[in-house]
DNA sequence: GATTAGGTTTTG
């Protein structure tokens, strides 16, 4: 068996013949005496088995001596080995790249390819029964990643063989042409993958390591995801199976068969997280150490040129910079240009170029509602970057490399109308091509730079602004603050024109005054809608809660205790209701009374007094008759119920009277003289001061300058496009109010997600405990966009509180 | 199965 595989764990002494005369590969020459000599090296290339006819084969392989003395011929430690016949076939089947070989019985010939492959001038030819190849399978760690060149005893290799696959990383200074190596390095320059004229994408890198040698590296791969994930200069890269090559007199690295790459953040102290799309890469403690060693080393080297990553707030016109940002929206401009709308949460001190595109071509939302200070930058990307941009999803985080800040950006054809003078405005161009690393890529959501950006962008949804860099944004004059008209959730209906001011200004100016503001809803009270329903007395100006059914039911129960007779003068229908379980409940009479006057006019059913009914019974009867007035008859005289209960039921609606301002009529004349039967006339007839339904809410408003509590009361009905009376009785009307609040303040939403409102605020003073307090109320303001078909019922609105 | 590109002095 000419190819002898050394088994795992077997010491070389048992199977490998004595090797007293090993020749170092660089020392080989055509005149070398070969008999009884051996050569040792690692397989760095294994060619295909070539058939030359029946049972005749040829195979070419390259081995590299790893422990050769550097002061000898460093460039010639790799040599072509040509195997013939059965040996070639055996070799093809039992040897892999990375294995270590000991070969014997060879002849030394002149390498016909030396000028081309830059390898050893000689080759080794192995043929016949005298030729032997001993193989230590698998890749074996021969030395740690240190620039020193120490040798490892053969026995060490064998013990480790096939147990743990370990990689040897070559210092960049030690690379010789034509070999396959693994390297660890710091990225000092990179281009995002770009399409080649061939079948692959190409990544171009420049890398360096502790040996301080800078080496170019070209990665060809048809799959974008398999390209190195490099986000910035200073990232750490691990390359497996890259081929050294001489180009323009310098060593460069090129992908070779079985190539793989992993990258890491280059920041000292950050977690060592491998970035790879491969599910089966090797990563161990040694990798952490190698990454950390490179980070520490690079930190003191100033390898990375003056940090090109710049926020919009620090952009200088006419410069090139890298921008980390969030994509808000994009739109194709023409076949060679795409518009990206991005922001990074900082405000560019220069006015920004506004690029108009047809709204229907815009993908994503320009989210102008949260961009109160015009933070959106328009980036025009050209040519090859258009293709990359096509894959981008609004909302994703990007880094754009070598972005050009162009003052007085020339106008786009689509930009002619309305953009009269933007000569001083800054436009951002990602020019075509890949020179200077021009390009863009999506950054993963969890990358450290994104965490910073996210935090900044989320500050827009918080009221506590601690970041001094944002202060400038918030303190921009209100004139420059403005959401897109389409994004405003409310509309001012007032007929006066006053300047729009910030909430801070509203507070500082104080009452009495009217203000126009633009704000978002931070919170509101009450959260439970029925609690916002109030009863208002025009007479005494008090507001009371609508009593709940337990309270009202209690009034009815109390009234039922009056079982005495009622005074005459009414048509009376007396119903004796059977006992109901529980059996101890007293039997009772339910009495319907109708005034003789109405009876005479044939309006008997239009106003019915009801005595002795429960609340539930009253509601049931009310659903069939137009006006039901629950009554009692203490001392035999018909009297309306206590005004904690409704004095009138009309269909499903209930009407209340003011306890304080009503002067209830009693007796025979009750209900006399009613012409038009509605709640007002009935109230008048009963001496009831009618209470009016209203909606009362406290809205906490917020803009960039602060927050302010404002009431929604007087114009609440038009604000919600709903009548309070309907809201008190009708689920659909209640839902409408809830929908509006959910739109202004979506449950679980951040401030950034809430719409802006144009508001008219009335500032006035109230006295409370002898103190004058400033109060604010939202007036003349309607919500927009929903329920266009509904309009508030015409009601007299409660006057200002 | 080889080929692709080989940083760069950009500019709508």
Image (tube, coloured by chain):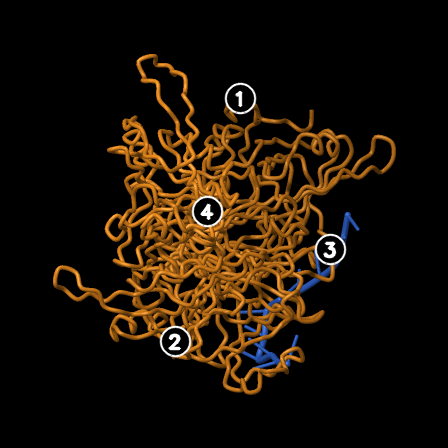
The residues tagged by marks 4 and 2 sit, at their Cα atoms, a distance apart of 32 Å
User: Mark 3 sits on what residue?
Assistant: A199
User: Mark 1 sits on what residue?
Assistant: A14
* Palette colour of chain B: blue
The residues tagged by marks 1 and 4 sit, at their Cα atoms, a distance apart of 92 Å
Q: Secondary structure at mark 4?
A: helix
Left or right: where A632 falls relative to A215: left
Specify which label sits upstream in the sequence, 3 or 2: 3
Provide residue A679's location: percent of width, then percent of height. Answer: 42, 50
Q: State the quadrant of the C terminus of chain A.
A: bottom left
Mark 1 and mark 4 on one chain = yes
| Label 1 crowd bin: few (<14), some (14–19), many (20+), radius 10 Å | few
Specify which label sits upstream in the sequence, 4 or 3: 3
Q: State the quadrant of the N terminus of chain A.
A: top right
User: Mark 4 sits on what residue?
Assistant: A734
Provide residue A198's location: percent of width, then percent of height. Answer: 74, 58
Q: Within the image, what quadrant is residue A468 found in?
A: bottom left
Q: Secondary structure at mark 2?
A: strand
Residue at horizontal 52%, vertical 26%?
Answer: A12
């Amino acid at each position: 068996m000419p190819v002898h595989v050394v088994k795992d764990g077997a010491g070389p002494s048992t199977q490998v013949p004595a090797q007293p005369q090993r020749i170092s590969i660089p020392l080989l020459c055509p005149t070398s005496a070969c008999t009884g000599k051996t050569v040792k090296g690692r397989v760095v290339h294994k060619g295909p088995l070539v058939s030359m006819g029946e049972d005749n084969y040829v195979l070419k392989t390259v081995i590299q001596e790893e422990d050769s003395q550097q002061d000898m011929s460093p460039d010639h430690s790799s040599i072509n080995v040509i195997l013939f016949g059965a040996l070639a076939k055996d070799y093809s089947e039992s040897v892999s790249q990375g294995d270590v070989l000991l070969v014997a019985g060879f002849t030394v010939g002149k390498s016909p390819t030396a000028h081309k492959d830059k390898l050893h001038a000689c080759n080794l030819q192995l043929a016949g029964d005298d030729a032997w190849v001993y193989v230590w399978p698998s890749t074996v760690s021969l030395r740690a990643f240190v620039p020193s060149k120490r040798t490892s005893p053969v026995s060490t290799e064998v013990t480790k063989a096939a147990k743990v696959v370990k990689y040897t990383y070559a210092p960049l200074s030690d690379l010789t042409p034509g070999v396959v190596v693994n390297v660890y390095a710091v990225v000092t320059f990179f281009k995002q993958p770009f399409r080649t004229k061939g079948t692959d994408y190409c990544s171009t890198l420049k890398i360096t390591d502790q040996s301080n040698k800078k080496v170019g590296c070209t990665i060809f791969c048809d799959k974008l995801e398999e390209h190195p994930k490099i986000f910035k200069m200073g990232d750490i890269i691990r390359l497996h199976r890259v081929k050294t090559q001489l180009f323009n007199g310098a060593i460069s690295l090129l992908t070779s068969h079985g190539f793989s790459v992993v990258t890491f953040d280059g920041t000292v102290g950050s977690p060592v997280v491998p970035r790879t799309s491969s599910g089966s890469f090797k990563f161990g403690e040694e990798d952490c150490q190698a990454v950390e060693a490179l980070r520490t080393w690079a930190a003191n080297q100033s390898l990375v040129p003056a940090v090109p990553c710049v926020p919009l707030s620090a952009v200088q016109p006419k410069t090139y910079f890298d921008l980390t940002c969030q994509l808000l929206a994009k739109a194709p401009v023409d076949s060679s240009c795409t518009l990206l709308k991005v922001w990074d949460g900082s405000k560019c001190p220069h006015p920004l170029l506004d690029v108009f595109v047809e709204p229907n071509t815009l993908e994503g939302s320009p989210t102008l509602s949260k961009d109160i200070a015009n933070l959106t930058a328009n980036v025009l990307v050209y040519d090859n970057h258009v293709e990359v941009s096509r894959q981008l999803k609004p909302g994703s985080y990007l880094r754009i490399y070598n972005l050009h800040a162009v003052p007085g950006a020339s106008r786009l054809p689509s930009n002619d109308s309305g953009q009269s003078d933007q000569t001083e405005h800054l436009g951002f161009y990602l020019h075509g091509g890949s020179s200077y690393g021009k390009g863009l890529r999506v950054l993963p959501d969890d990358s450290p730079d994104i965490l910073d950006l996210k935090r900044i962008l989320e500050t827009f949804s918080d009221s506590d602004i601690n970041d001094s860099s944002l202060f400038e944004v918030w303190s921009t004059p209100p004139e420059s603050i403005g959401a897109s008209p389409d994004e405003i959730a409310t509309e001012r209906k007032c007929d006066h024109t006053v300047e729009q001011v910030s909430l801070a200004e509203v507070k500082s100016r104080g009452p009495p005054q009217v203000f126009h503001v633009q704000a978002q809803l931070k919170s509101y009270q009450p959260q439970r809608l029925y609690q916002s329903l109030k009863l208002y007395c025009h007479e005494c100006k008090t507001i009371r809660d609508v009593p709940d059914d337990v309270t009202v039911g209690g009034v009815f129960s109390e009234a039922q205790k009056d079982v005495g007779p009622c005074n005459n003068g009414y048509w009376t229908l007396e119903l004796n209701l059977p006992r109901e379980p529980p059996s101890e409940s007293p039997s009772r009479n339910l009495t319907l009374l109708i005034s003789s006057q109405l009876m005479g006019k044939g309006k008997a059913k239009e106003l019915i007094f009801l005595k002795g009914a429960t609340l539930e019974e009253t509601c049931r009867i009310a659903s069939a008759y137009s006006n039901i007035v629950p009554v009692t008859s203490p001392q035999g005289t018909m009297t309306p119920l206590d005004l904690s209960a409704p004095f009138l039921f009309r269909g499903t609606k209930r009407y209340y009277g003011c306890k304080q301002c009503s002067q209830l009529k009693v007796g025979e004349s009750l209900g006399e003289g009613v012409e038009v039967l509605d709640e007002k006339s009935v109230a008048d007839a009963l001496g009831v001061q009618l209470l009016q339904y209203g909606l009362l809410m406290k809205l906490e408003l917020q803009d960039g300058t602060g927050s302010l509590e404002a009431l929604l009361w007087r114009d609440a009905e038009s604000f919600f496009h709903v009548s309070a009376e309907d809201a008190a009785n009708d689920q659909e009307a209640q839902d409408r109010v809830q929908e509006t609040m959910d739109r202004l303040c979506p449950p679980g939403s951040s401030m950034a997600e809430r719409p802006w409102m144009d508001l008219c605020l009335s500032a006035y003073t109230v006295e409370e405990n002898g103190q004058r307090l400033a109060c604010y109320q939202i007036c003349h303001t309607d919500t927009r966009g929903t329920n266009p078909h509904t309009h508030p019922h015409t009601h007299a609105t409660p006057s200002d509180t």
